Image: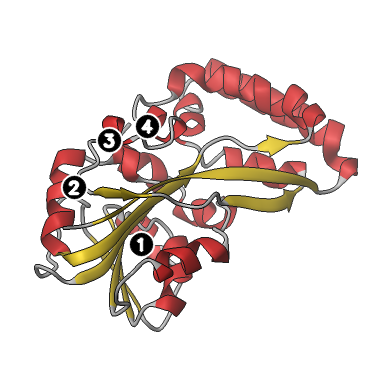
Amino acid sequence: MDAARTFALDSAGYARNRPSYPAELFAWIASACRARRAAWDCATGNGQAALGLAPHFERVEATDVSAEQIGAGFAAPNVRYSAQPAERTDFADAAFDLVAVAQALHWFDLPRFWAEVGRVAKPGAFFCAWGYAWFDLDAEVRAHFLDPLLALFEPYWAPENRLLWDGYRSEDIGFPFARVAAPPFAIRLEWDIAALAAHVRTWSACRRAMADPAAAAAIAALGADALERFAARGPFPLEMPIAIAAGRIG
């Protein structure tokens, strides 16, 4: 199952159950841009990053290869959605002050994508890709729910996920721009066990595993046990460190 189809299976659920990015991240990205007229949020999904960029730019073009995801996008007056692949768009040359990619860089045909970024970005524009993978959370929830799930999911992860897990290293992604160091950022939130389970269901590996009846039964059993074990506890804190690949274009 390809990435576009995996994330389009339940676009509304993806929109509900993916966490928002910290406002400080968008403020830092905007501060690194030499102008703020136009930004391209590539592989926008449901538009979380586009929504975060919108207050900082006159115009945000938000694209995704999945028309289903675009259909679930969050509206903002200066955000325009369109269904386009990352590697080939209809944007004019030298159109953008920022090219941004949230939680998606590892899915692209990277040589073709870098060429497209070079075409549509203004000279000196800023590029920033970011994503989160694992999180720090309550030890008991990890031991009785998350770790067993991760063991189940192990055969179902796509090889591309490792690019994110390893922090978008320049040598792994063929990063062609002058790299800019980013401050540390993390997503911090509080979820109960039902919210955590709903988030896990948006993972590509979970969606692949659910197509295997034996794995699906094991996932359902773990979920039922976790809901019974932790339902009375209420929300618990989670922290998701953010990996960033940022650079100056041209």
Q: Residues within 10 Å of mark 2 (few under 14, many from 20)?
A: some
Q: Which quadrant of the view contains residue 69? A: bottom left
| Labels 3 & 4 near each other (Cβ < 8 A) | yes
Q: Which mark is residue 113?
A: 2
Circle 1 SS class = helix
Q: Residues within 10 Å of mark 1 (few under 14, many from 20)?
A: many
Q: Residues within 10 Å of mark 3 (few under 14, many from 20)?
A: some
Amino acid type indicated by mark 1: Ile
Give the Cα separation between the discs numbered 3 and 4.
7 Å
Amino acid type indicated by mark 2: Phe
| Quarter of the figure that contains the C terminus | bottom left
Circle 2 SS class = helix
Mark sitting earlier along the chain (3/4): 4
Q: Which mark is residue 173?
A: 3
Give the Cα separation between the discs numbered 4 and 2.
15 Å
Give the Cα separation between the discs numbered 4 and 1.
25 Å
Q: Which residue is mark 1?
A: 70
Circle 3 SS class = helix
Residue drawn at x 67%, y 28% as measured from the top left: 146
